[in-house]
Amino acid sequence: MQTDVLIVGSGCAGLYCALNLPKDKNILMITKDIVEHSDSYLAQGGMCMLKDPDDFDSYFYDTMKAGHFENDTAAVETMIKESPDLVKDLLSYGVDFQRDEDGNLAYTREGAHARNRIVYHEDITGKEITSHLYEQCKKLDNLTIKEHWTMVDLLTKDNCCYGVVVRKDDGSLDTITANYTVLACGGIGGIYRYSTNYRHLTGDGIAVAIKHGVELKNVNYVQIHPTTFYSEKEEDRSFLISESVRGEGAKLYNNSKERFTEELLPRDILTGNIRKEMKREGSEHVWLSMKTIDPEQLKEHFPNIVEHCKEHGYNVPDEMIPVVPAQHYFMGGIKVNLQSKTSMDQLYAIGETACNGVHGRNRLASNSLLESMVFAKRAAKEMTAEFDKTKTKSFDNVDFTPYEDKKKLEEEYKQLIRDEIDKENAKMNDEEKQEN
Ligand SMILES: Cc1cc2nc3c(=O)[nH]c(=O)nc-3n(C[C@H](O)[C@H](O)[C@H](O)COP(=O)(O)OP(=O)(O)OC[C@H]3O[C@@H](n4cnc5c(N)ncnc54)[C@H](O)[C@@H]3O)c2cc1C
């Protein structure tokens, strides 16, 4: 198969990229599961935006501070400045963000934000945004979407990408060649036992990048979400209790029902405090109380969270719920520039798979939907401008033997990522020891 642009992944990054490519180019999008099964659909809290120019400095500072000032400042500036245009696009697609009594956009707040600057739709903002992107994509005559088609490798020669090897929905293996390949494969939660991510998001883009020597960045920067619903049952995916719940006033307690931390600290610091308290008490979780939130407001703003708690036997806000930290987000990834270009020719990476340095060492809440889409559009713009310079190459005699054992390949890829994370952690520990 041959296409002009191949997009691997159908989350908000992949879909928004497709919407920004020219209508005279053939786009093929492949996705490992169904379109609706991406982390983009799971985003609860909302999406940050520059609500007025006066908030620029404060928003910039909050992002940098959460990232321990290791962020790429140009990337942060770009993301913030381009956020109003993105929101305009989303509104034009029919995305229904919460409004105040005067009909203006309403803004909520999450941990480590000095001000309210997050647009949202109940506690299903990701679904609201991504389903509208998908609806727009369905209208494109130049886009074909293949569900349950999994990229298992890149086709490369002399540091240029010419497409991928794919496992199709019927299990057969094939090649797809393309002038441009865009990796939009999401995060790496699937390699962890406890994660808020979909289980099939196993960092495949990262694994093939490692295999082919594509540069990575901050690959050991993995965010743990401080508050996911604790369940004794080994649920597939940890259910997130959004940071906005704490933003709206929910409080954390230990097993003696005592407060032990500030609730709106950056995620890594709060996670550390919760783990420390759990260790001190020898407990499996701590407690979150939503009593401080008006019950009507709770039901209106967080209907899914209220429902999930109820399904698991907790009546909020009257009862506290048990919460525990779990893997949530990958700040590192395939190293890209401000146009989302990787170190390999004709290969772009966008969304959680990519690392342009926007998040530094720790992501500020609600910056990831925004970052995914802002830099997806920038990739689309550069691909459009540079398309005539691309080359294609046919790969007729690819040996599919290494991909035949699906389970073995999946394990190999997971291990590649774990080894890379361990290597980077060891390097960082050595550097820290030398500094001391
Ligand atoms: C529970 C939860 C709540 C969140 N809440 C927020 C929030 O409130 N605000 C915010 O800004 N961010 C939030 N995030 C983070 C945000 O949702 C993600 O960072 C963002 O959606 C990533 O988008 P993406 O397009 O890069 O990846 P995803 O949406 O995860 O999409 C990845 C796609 O790649 C496909 N794929 C993966 N591997 C392959 C392969 N080998 N072949 C083919 N296809 C492949 C998948 O099937 C999927 O379609 C949340 C995340 C979670 C898990």
Image: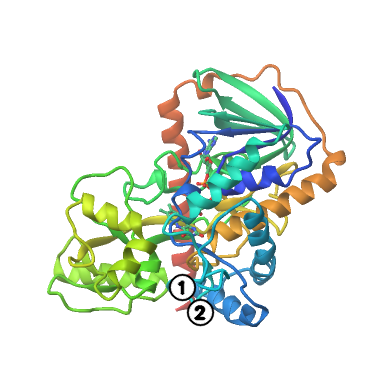
Query: Which one is nearer the viewer's eye here, 390 or 293?
Result: 293
Residue found at x 75% / y 32% = 26
**Label 2: how many Cα within 10 Å (few below 14, some 14–19, many 20+):** some
Which residue shows up at 53% across the image and 77% down it? 62
Residue located at (50% from left, 64% from top): 98
Which residue, given by chain and number where applicable, does mark 2 sit on?
115
Answer with the quarter of the image where residue 290 lies: bottom left
Label 1: element kind: loop
Mark number, residue 348: none
Query: Farthest residue in the right direction?
Result: 388
Residue type, mark 2 in image: Arg
Q: Is mark 2 within 8 Å of ligand 1?
A: no
Q: Nearer the viewer, residue 433 or 268?
A: 268
Mark 1, residue position = 109
The type of residue carrying mark 1 is: Arg
How far across and down, in percent of the image, does residue 426 sit?
A: 44, 60
The response on whether ligand 1 sits within 8 Å of label 1 is: no
Q: Of the residues under marks 1 and 2, which one precedes in the sequence?
A: 1
Residue appearing at x 18%, y 58% in the figure: 314
Q: How far is the residue under mark 1 from the one under mark 2?
A: 6 Å
Query: Does the CB distance between marks 1 and 2 fall below 8 Å?
Result: yes
Quarter of the image that includes the N terminus? top right
Relative depth, front residue between 320 and 105: 105
Q: Residue 213, can we see it?
A: no
Provide residue 374's location: percent of width, then percent of height.
66, 58
Q: Position of residue 100 (x, y in %)?
A: 51, 71
Locate residue 303 relative to residue 362 in the image: left or right.
left
